[in-house]
């Protein structure tokens, strides 16, 4: 019961990445909508993989609701719908405008694997930007529709970063055995945050971390040993803190990983 407060949030994150492999789809949720890029275009990839940047006003209702639900979290999500796989790259909540995410290319890497070339832009110190919260995202649609192993390559800025965390390890979609090393920097209230590892069904590991409190960035390096054998091939490492106001999950970053020892 100790994880009751955040297990529901974890389920929302995992459903797009894990259930897509089984043809499932998340239930529509609520959130502050931020429109993805609407420039319509398509590119034919090698080995029979086609991808395009869909227009937001042409998305099926279920896909539009899914984008709205996921956009405030930092991560890469997948949803299979009508023989297409939608891949959402969400950079999380940003304090101002001026942030952007662009998918430059999608290339196949063997069977059911894709390389994503992604450019991230952030405003400079002297940039004039809108002073509102924004949720920069990019969305691509890939055919055929299946769950893809993804290899993202980022240019321009660090992807796994928000107001509270900078994550160095693990790399996104890294393969791990019976433990995972998590490194980076944290800038959180009273220096307390949490790391959890989930496989879509159970919590494999969970640890409360104490570092130097904000406003300083404090390094951390922790290895989480799994308490159970993973029950699925894919999972997520979550790094997050809680709001000092109401205890809700805040500034979460999810790093998708693969398990080599799952049963």
Image (spheres, rainbow, N blue to C red):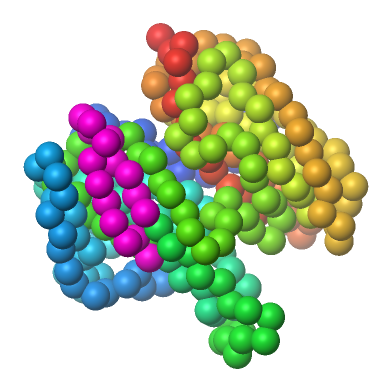
Residue 110 on the magenta segment = yes
Residue 231 place in picture, x, y as percent: 43, 16
The residue segment tinted magenta is 102-117
Asked where in the image residue 195 lies, by quadrant, the reply is top right
* Viewer-closest of 254 and 203: 254
**236 and 143: which one is in front?**
143
User: Does any portion of residue 245 appear in the rendered image?
Assistant: yes
Q: Residue at x 76, y 43 (%)?
A: 193
The quadrant of the image that shows the N terminus is top right
Pick the quarter of the image with the C terminus.
top left
Above/below status of 235 relative to 48? above
Residue shown at the point (61%, 24%) measured from the top left: 180
| Vertical side of 208 occupied by 68: above or below | below
Q: Position of residue 217 (x, y in %)?
A: 82, 54
Horizontal side, residue 20 vs residue 90: left or right: left
The spot of residue 15 in percent (x, y) is 38, 39
Q: Quadrant of residue 226?
A: top right
- View extreme (bottom): residue: 128
Question: Is residue 159 shown left or right of residue 101?
Answer: right
Q: Classify residue 38 as left or right of residue 254.
A: left
Task: Report the predominant secondary structure element of the magenta stretch.
Answer: strand
Residue 5 highlighted magenta (yes or no): no
| Residue at 40% from the left image edge and 58% from the top image edge | 118
> Does residue 202 appear anywhere in the picture?
no
Count all numbered tags in the image, as a single digit. 0
* Residue 192 placement (x, y as % from top left): 82, 44
In the image, residue 198 above or below residue 94: above
Which residue is at a point 51% across and 70% down the rendered structure image?
A: 121
């Amino acid at each position: 019961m100790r994880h009751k407060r955040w297990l529901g949030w974890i389920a929302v994150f995992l459903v797009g990445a894990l259930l897509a492999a089984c043809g499932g789809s998340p239930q529509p949720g609520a959130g502050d909508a931020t429109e993805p890029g609407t420039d319509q275009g398509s590119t034919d990839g090698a080995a029979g993989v086609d991808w395009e940047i869909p227009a937001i006003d042409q998305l099926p209702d279920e896909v539009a609701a899914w984008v709205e639900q996921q956009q405030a979290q930092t991560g890469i999500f997948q949803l299979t719908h009508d023989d297409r796989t939608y891949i959402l790259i969400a950079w999380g909540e940003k304090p101002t405008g001026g942030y952007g995410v662009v998918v430059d290319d999608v290339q196949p890497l063997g069977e059911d694997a894709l390389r994503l070339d992604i450019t991230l832009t952030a405003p400079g110190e002297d940039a004039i930007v809108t002073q509102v919260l924004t949720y920069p995202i990019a969305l691509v649609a890939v055919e055929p529709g299946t769950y893809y192993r993804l290899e993202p390559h980022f240019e321009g800025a660090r992807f796994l970063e928000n107001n509270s965390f900078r994550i160095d390890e693990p790399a996104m979609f890294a393969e791990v055995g019976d433990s995972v090393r998590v490194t980076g920097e944290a800038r959180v209230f009273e220096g307390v945050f949490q790391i959890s590892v989930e496989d879509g069904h159970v919590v494999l590991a969970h640890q409360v971390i104490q570092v130097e409190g904000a406003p300083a960035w404090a390094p951390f390096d922790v290895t989480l040993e799994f308490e159970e054998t993973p029950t699925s091939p894919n999972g997520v490492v979550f790094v997050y803190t809680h709001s000092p106001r109401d205890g809700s999950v805040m500034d979460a970053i999810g790093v998708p990983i693969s398990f080599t020892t799952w049963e």
